[in-house]
């Protein structure tokens, strides 16, 4: 059984040789696996989508066949307006995307509609049944289920045990009946058969007996989606199902979402990636500052200036200005300008603040993810690490921070060996680390999270708080708010702020823009540059290769656990070899 300290591979490090993700088309259909609710009987998804063609694209417009109707729903958190929706309807049998900038209220609206939180005011009906005030488990039984941005798989149960828990109305869950197995054996066999069929459909059937805690992030997303289907719902609500998932599994998840719609299910999903929204959605609803600001077909949303300003950011697709480019290039130029032209010899070790040499590391005994990686960070430098999925980028950061044992090679900080040193000692030595997920204490306030950043530090709290709030003004405004009630982008600011509380000289960032809207991604990169300008050296792993290479002084491109290329960020951005290896499928290079 896995414990809380068991390292878990990310999608980036899923062991080679696993079956490829996607739908197993030889598996039974949903109609064969699940009972068909009355709301889906005889439903034609194409006709349902076609009916939207005559609907005016304005906020709050009525739908021809609404499965879910929301009226006057409002929710405040400590005086902050999280949700303020006058009226919105969701068409049955289609895919509706719910988009908007971070903090717009999308996840909070999901929580309210599915009974995980209580609104201050408002009503909503599902298939004509009032669900306001109904608890979450009863909402699920009524046929409306949801998944979470941060998956809720029960890590110390097996994949099959997680699936069985998703089925409703199980006789064996009653206290007295549990002692009479002859009453529930046949039902459990039916539940198991249904679970096996769904796991086969999601290509997780080879992992039936594995603990859920050992699955990668993308595999846990697939497990959570398949477990939700055990309820045989009419409506499934997916909260950022693609966040932090590598491109291969993203395509698998997209295929699954489309198949749910094609088999008559109503899908409502939150997503930041507009390419995905345009690809799979039939209708789009846009939120900002808690309210609905626009809705309509994907094409009309893409042309809506209000949406562009609120969600995409006015300049998110623009290159850096000449001044900005000069700013990112200048420190590297200063670092190398005194070296003779054509000198390719390695710099002396004392030139490096952090140096990793021939690092070999991995999660599973006998399987190396890193196969001799090298990294050199100078004082005041900003380094970006990119590469195709499975290259070992996140593993490299975890090994540098002592979270994964290094099997061979060495790591030094200011010339002192720190190979496999424990994380708490590295923090005391001036190394900060911000993980991609689970990077805040949700039950603590923002201020308490920041206090935790000084747990091993000696700096006065007020002094460091002032520095952090200067970098992230929002944190000063939300000091007393619980971190768990913040949006994904706001939590990322808390995580980065907490790391900065210890006044680090080196900051390790693992995909800080993952799951954020493009506008928030831009803000994160700006903040990273400001942190670097304040004298903190940064090593950043990032999927958004374009922005990463634009802001970094130098970049490393990893491939299959080794260094493929390295150089100035802007040079790598236009290097044909790098484009072919990585950027060609993920970014457009002018």
Image (cartoon, rainbow, N blue to C red):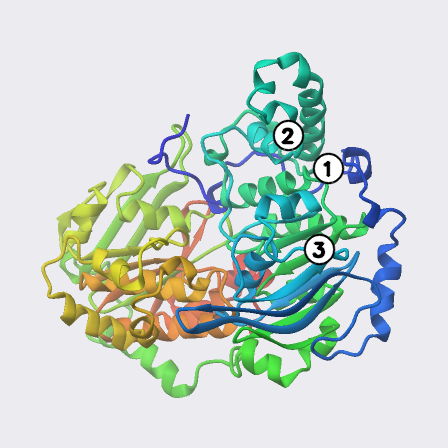
Crowd rating for badge 3 (residues with CA inside 10 Å; few <14, some 14–19, many 20+): many
Between the residue at mark 3 and the residue at mark 2, the CA separation in whole angstroms equals 24 Å
User: Which numbered disc, 3 or 2, marks the residue that appears first in the sequence?
Assistant: 2
Label disc, if present, on residue 24 of the rendered structure: 1
The secondary structure type at the circle numbered 3 is strand
Q: Is residue 21 visible?
A: no
Of 193 and 574, which appears nearest the observer? 193
Q: Is residue 113 left or right of residue 523?
A: right
Quadrant into which the C terminus falls: bottom right
Residue denoted by label 3: 267
In the rendering, at what x and y percent does residue 466 appear? Answer: 20, 74
State yes or no: discs 1 and 3 in contact (Cβ < 8 Å).
no
Q: Quadrant of residue 89?
A: bottom right
Label disc, if present, on residue 205 of the rendered structure: 2
User: Which numbered disc, 1 or 2, marks the residue that appears first in the sequence?
Assistant: 1
Residue 228 higher or lower than 308, as above or below: above
Q: Is residue 158 visible?
A: yes
User: Which numbered disc, 1 or 3, marks the residue that appears first in the sequence?
Assistant: 1
Q: Is residue 274 left or right of residue 501?
A: right
| Residue at the image point whose x is 72% and y is 40% from the top | 232
State yes or no: discs 1 and 2 in contact (Cβ < 8 Å).
yes
Q: Quadrant of residue 106?
A: bottom right
| Residue at the image point whose x is 80% and y is 79% from the top | 56
Between the residue at mark 1 and the residue at mark 2, the CA separation in whole angstroms equals 10 Å
Quadrant into which the N terminus falls: top left
Crowd rating for badge 2 (residues with CA inside 10 Å; few <14, some 14–19, many 20+): some
């Amino acid at each position: 059984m896995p414990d809380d300290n068991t390292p878990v591979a990310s999608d980036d490090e899923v062991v080679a040789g696993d079956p490829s993700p996607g739908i197993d088309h030889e598996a039974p259909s949903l109609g064969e696996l699940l009972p068909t609710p009355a709301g889906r009987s005889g439903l034609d998804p194409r006709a349902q989508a076609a009916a939207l063609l005559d609907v005016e694209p304005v906020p709050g417009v009525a739908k021809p066949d609404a499965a879910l109707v929301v009226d006057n729903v409002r929710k405040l958190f400590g005086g902050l307006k999280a949700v303020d929706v006058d009226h919105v309807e969701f068409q049955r049998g289609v895919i509706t995307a719910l988009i908007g900038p971070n903090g717009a209220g999308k996840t909070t609206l999901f929580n309210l509609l599915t009974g995980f939180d209580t609104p201050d005011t408002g009503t909503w009906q599902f298939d004509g049944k009032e669900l306001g005030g109904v608890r979450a488990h009863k909402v699920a039984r009524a046929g409306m289920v949801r998944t979470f941005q941060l998956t809720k798989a029960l890590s110390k149960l097996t994949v099959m045990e997680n699936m069985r828990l998703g089925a409703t109305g199980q006789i064996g869950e009653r206290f007295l009946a549990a002692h009479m197995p002859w009453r529930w054996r046949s039902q459990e066999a039916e539940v198991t058969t249904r679970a096996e069929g769904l796991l086969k459909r999601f290509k997780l059937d080879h992992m039936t007996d594995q603990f859920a805690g050992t699955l990668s992030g993308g595999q846990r997303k697939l497990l959570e989606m398949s477990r939700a289907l055990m309820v045989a719902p009419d409506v499934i609500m997916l909260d950022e199902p693609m966040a932090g998932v590598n491109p291969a599994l993203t395509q698998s998840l997209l295929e699954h979402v489309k198949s749910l719609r094609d088999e008559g299910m109503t899908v409502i999903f939150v997503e930041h990636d507009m390419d995905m929204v345009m690809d799979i959605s039939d209708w789009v609803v846009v939120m900002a500052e808690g309210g609905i600001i626009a809705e309509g077909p994907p094409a009309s949303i893409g042309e809506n200036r209000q949406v562009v300003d609120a969600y995409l950011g006015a300049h998110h697709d623009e290159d850096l200005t000449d001044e900005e480019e000069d700013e990112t290039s200048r420190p590297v130029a200063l670092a190398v300008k005194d070296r003779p032209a054509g000198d390719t010899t390695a710099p002396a070790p004392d030139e490096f603040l952090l140096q990793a040499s021939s690092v070999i590391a991995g999660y599973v005994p006998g399987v190396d993810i890193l196969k001799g990686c090298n990294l050199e960070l100078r004082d005041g430098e900003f380094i970006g690490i990119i590469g195709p999925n499975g290259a070992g980028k996140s593993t490299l950061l975890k090994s540098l921070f002592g979270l994964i044992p290094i099997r061979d090679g060495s790591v030094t900080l200011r010339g002192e060996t720190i190979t496999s040193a424990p994380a708490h000692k590295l923090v005391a030595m001036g190394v900060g680390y911000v993980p991609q997920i689970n990077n805040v204490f949700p039950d603590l306030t923002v201020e308490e999270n920041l206090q935790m950043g000084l747990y091993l530090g000696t700096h006065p709290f007020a002094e460091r708080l002032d520095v952090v709030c200067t970098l992230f003004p929002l944190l000063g405004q939300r000091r007393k708010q619980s971190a768990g009630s913040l949006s994904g982008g706001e939590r990322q600011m808390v995580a980065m702020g907490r790391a900065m509380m210890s006044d680090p000289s080196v900051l390790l960032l693992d995909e800080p823009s993952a799951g954020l809207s493009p506008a928030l991604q831009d803000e994160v990169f700006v903040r990273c540059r400001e942190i670097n300008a304040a004298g903190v050296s940064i090593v950043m792993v990032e999927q958004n290769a374009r922005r990463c290479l634009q802001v970094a002084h130098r970049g490393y491109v990893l491939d299959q656990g080794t260094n493929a290329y390295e150089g100035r960020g802007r040079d790598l951005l236009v290097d044909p070899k790098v484009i072919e290896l990585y950027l060609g499928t993920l970014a457009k290079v002018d």
